[in-house]
Image: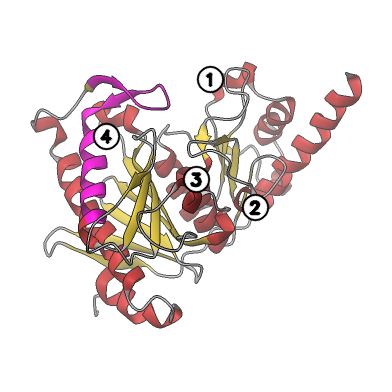
């Protein structure tokens, strides 16, 4: 069987973007290179001094893990060295990182990234991941600005994630379907392992942190109860599967079918996940695989971005399951408003 590497696949697909002239291809390869380095460190994290917390907190108020810092540094370094990016937005940095260098003076793209999603699981050897989103810049020249990132998800040129698990996989889309590549450590290359990925219209898995049940909106509570009811016609009750590492949960549901929910809570009334560099790229992938992604009311990729670290609730996965969850949200949200 002929093996197709990520580099070969990207070159073959270059004609899908005649305006890009190879820059997007090089940018995706740069991300792949950084992912290999991060994967190497994740795999040996228990053997070296990079586990645990640094004692600092990031812009989200979350404890910064040592491996978070390493991953952030690696992706920033790779993107700067590649010269295809004029600015970077990272979960780990309060502000954007404009790039003002000779090789990037004509750069056409900006990258928004969560360098290490699920980092609270690092110390207990659970899968973590990287999520990234690529946009064409909206400003004309020079280093990128915040304005370049204030674009809806529908404007993404590419979105993807890397999962560092029992194997390392990179899954991405450029709006022409979804493809998955598994890292072959024997040759040091990502190889096409999951071509043209599609998720099921209807799955049997729901993924949500039920420990927060008391703090969920009524629509979410009712949907969870619906998932737990016995009904042979709809293969219920569904299985509850929640790893607590977003990339891992969503990757499983992409392959097997299911719904991932991270709703608003009384503690996080705007939701917790970030729209720009978590929800938009994940929504792009899921939609291209035949699924849906909403905030409980509206399509994720049509939401306006007003802040770099803007938060949103997320309902994402198999389209029929998302539709059913939306029915519950609409019905019980409306009932609550009427009763008030």
For the residues labelled 1 and 2, the Cα–Cα distance comes to: 30 Å
For the residues labelled 3 and 1, the Cα–Cα distance comes to: 26 Å
Mark 3 lies on residue: 276
Q: Residue 333: image x %, image y %?
A: 80, 30
Q: First in sequence: mark 1 or mark 2? A: 1
Q: Residue 334: image x %, image y %?
A: 85, 31
Q: First in sequence: mark 4 or mark 2? A: 4
Q: Quadrant of the C terminus?
A: top right
Q: Which mark is residue 302?
A: 2
Q: Residue 91: image x %, image y %?
A: 38, 37
Mark 4 lies on residue: 68
For the residues labelled 4 and 1, the Cα–Cα distance comes to: 25 Å
State if disc 2 and disc 1 touch (CB < 8 Å).
Answer: no
Stretch in magenta = 54-80
Q: Quarter-wise, where is residue 115 in the image?
A: top left
Q: First in sequence: mark 4 or mark 1? A: 4
Q: Farthest residue to the left: give it.
A: 48
Residue 19 in sight from this viewpoint: yes
Mark 1 lies on residue: 211
Q: Secondary structure at mark 2?
A: helix
Front residue of this view, candidates 276 and 186: 276
Q: Secondary structure at mark 4?
A: helix
Q: Quadrant of the N terminus?
A: bottom left
Q: Which mark is residue 155?
A: none
Q: First in sequence: mark 3 or mark 2? A: 3
Q: Secondary structure at mark 1?
A: helix
Examine the rendered structure and indicate whether residue 73 appears above or below residue 267. Answer: below
Residue drawn at (25%, 72%), measured in percent from left and top?
A: 7
Q: First in sequence: mark 3 or mark 4? A: 4
Residue drawn at (47%, 53%), measured in percent from left and top?
A: 148
């Amino acid at each position: 069987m002929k093996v197709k590497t990520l580099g070969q696949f990207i070159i073959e697909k270059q004609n899908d973007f005649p305006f890009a002239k190879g820059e997007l291809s090089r940018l995706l390869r740069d991300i792949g290179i950084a992912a290999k380095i991060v994967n190497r460190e994740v795999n040996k994290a228990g053997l070296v001094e990079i586990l645990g917390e640094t004692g600092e907190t990031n812009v989200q108020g979350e404890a910064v893990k040592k491996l978070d810092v390493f991953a952030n540094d690696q992706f920033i370094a790779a993107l700067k060295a590649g010269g295809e990016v004029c600015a970077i937005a990272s979960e780990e940095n309060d502000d954007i990182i404009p790039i003002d260098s000779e090789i990037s003076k004509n750069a056409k793209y900006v990258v928004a990234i969560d360098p290490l999603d699920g980092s609270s699981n690092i110390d207990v050897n659970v899968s973590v991941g990287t999520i990234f989103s690529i946009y064409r810049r909206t400003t004309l020249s020079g280093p990128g600005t915040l304005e370049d990132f204030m674009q809806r998800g529908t404007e993404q040129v590419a979105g993807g994630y890397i999962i560092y698990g029992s194997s390392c996989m990179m899954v991405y889309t450029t709006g022409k379907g979804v493809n998955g590549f598994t890292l072959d450590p024997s040759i040091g290359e990502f190889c096409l392992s999951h071509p043209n990925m599609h998720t099921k219209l209807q799955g049997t898995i729901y993924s949500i942190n039920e420990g927060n049940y008391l703090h969920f909106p009524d629509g979410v509570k009712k949907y969870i109860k619906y998932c737990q009811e016995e009904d042979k016609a709809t293969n219920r009750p569904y299985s509850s599967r929640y790893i607590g590492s977003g990339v891992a949960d969503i990757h499983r549901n992409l392959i097997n079918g299911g719904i991932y929910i991270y709703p608003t809570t009384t503690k996080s009334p705007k939701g917790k996940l970030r729209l720009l560099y978590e929800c938009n790229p994940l929504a792009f992938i899921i939609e291209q695989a035949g699924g849906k992604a909403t905030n409980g009311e509206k399509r994720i990729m049509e939401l306006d971005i007003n802040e770099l670290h803007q938060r949103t609730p997320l309902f994402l996965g198999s389209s029929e399951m998302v539709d059913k969850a939306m029915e519950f949200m609409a019905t019980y949200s409306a009932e609550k408003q009427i009763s008030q």
